[in-house]
Image (spheres, helix red, strand yellow):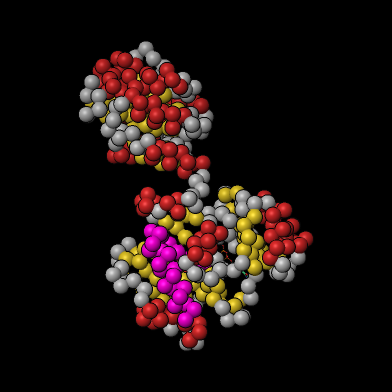
Amino acid sequence: MKIHEYQAKKLFSSYGIPVEQHILCHNVDEAVSAYEELNMEKVVLKAQVLTGGRGKAGGVKLVKCKADVMNYAASMFQMKINGLPVNKILVSEAVNIDSEFYLSFSIDRKNRSVVMMLSSEGGVEIEEVAKYTPENIYRINIDPFVGMPDYLARRIAFFLFDDMDLVGQIVQILQNLYQLFIENDASLAEINPLVLTKEGNLVAVDAKMTFDDNALYRQEDICFFSEPTEEEEIELQAKAKGFSYVHLTGDIGCMVNGAGLAMATMDLIKLNEGCPANFLDIGGSSNPKKISEAMRILLQDDRLKVILVNIFGGITRCDDVANGLLKAYEEMRADIPIVVRLTGTNEEEGRALLRNSNFLVAETMNEAIRKAVNQSIKAG
Ligand code: GDP
Ligand code: MN
């Protein structure tokens, strides 16, 4: 789960990592009052969107007067960055930059540990530094049983500084950021740039954090930051009902039992030049309630031209599934065609139940997929 810069800065502050003064704004009026409240000549307006490349897209602007705050904030609220609307901006104190550094903690899967990266080249993408001047990146894997004791933080600090005051400042930042990372099950904590101001202070001017979704159950405070998109909202609903659901780009809604069969279904749809709208694995159950819950999740999606139900009956009985489908249909009355393929235990009985219904029944997987793709083309 990603969080916004302003949220990450809140965490930074509570862990004693210095950030510049900033105020979160939801509209132009708030931005203007924030400018007045900060009472500084220069401020930086920063779009809050959960995507990278914000600066390049015009989402970071240094402004010097009230009129400019108004103009730039107005245009920023109109912006879309990588398809995401800008609903919030930060008005922050403009710091006097002497130099910019890069600092991050992330997970190094290969070495099964946290990795710290520190670079004298901040403010640019770390991938660029890694490519052209890798010698400017200091990389060290952190032993989970050792963590970030003083001696280690100091050793790292000397990579950038020999001034003892700055060494002291960055040691604090290294230890606090590591603690924040570990205690909250983060998968990334990145400060780019970590700025040395002309006044001699280190300040986190940007803050990026990502958290491990699988640990969110024990991170209540972090969950509180969640701002799911519409698609993620549907995924969360499906997860709460015990389904695996992945949102995809096409128009064929899929309901399948078993991840392997679901993958094969996606492949065959693609092979037949159709495009799946989702991956929905309803698991082993043929409980009619589950079937109608799955149907309800699919029918929320107005991109769908057709639904394809592909069920392999093992322990799951096809006649149970057919009954579930009929019941779901009674409750919901989909206005798009639904193609059903049932195979395995009690398949004959299952198909017989659907024969005089609104469902389009197919016997083989190929037939079902061709039917579904044809329906999606027809609805074009
Ligand atoms: P990003 O492009 O989304 O990573 O946004 P950042 O918050 O990292 O800002 C991008 C760049 O804008 C920084 O690397 C700085 O060069 C510049 N910048 C950001 N904040 C300030 C500031 O307070 N003062 C000055 N002078 N420049 C800033
Ligand atoms: Mn940045």
Tell me if residue 360 can be seen. no
Image vertical order of residue 248 relative to residue 133, above or below: above
Determine the residue located farthest toward the top in the rendered image.
356
Residue at the image position 35 percent from the left and 29 percent from the top: 290
User: Which residue is at the front of the view, 317 or 176?
Assistant: 176
User: Which residue is at the front of the view, 95 or 316?
Assistant: 95
Residue 265 image-quadrant placement: top left
User: Which residue is at the front of the view, 53 or 16?
Assistant: 16
Indicate whether residue 379 is drawn in magenta: no
Residue 360 spot, x, y in % from top left: 39, 20
Q: Please give the count of numbered marks on the rendered protein.
A: 0
Residue 80 spot, x, y in % from top left: 61, 51
Residue 12 spot, x, y in % from top left: 50, 65
Residue at the image position 45 percent from the left and 50 percent from the top: 223
Residue at the image position 55 percent from the left and 73 percent from the top: 203
Residue 156 spot, x, y in % from top left: 41, 79
Tell me if residue 296 can be seen. yes
**Main secondary-structure element of the magenta-colored stretch:** helix
User: Which residue is at the front of the view, 48 or 18?
Assistant: 18
Image vertical order of residue 241 relative to residue 124, above or below: above
Residue at the image position 51 percent from the left and 75 percent from the top: 101
**Numbered range of the magenta stretch:** 168-192
Residue 349 in the figure: left or right of residue 74: left
Indicate whether residue 171 is drawn in magenta: yes
Query: Where's ligand 1: which quadrant?
Result: bottom right
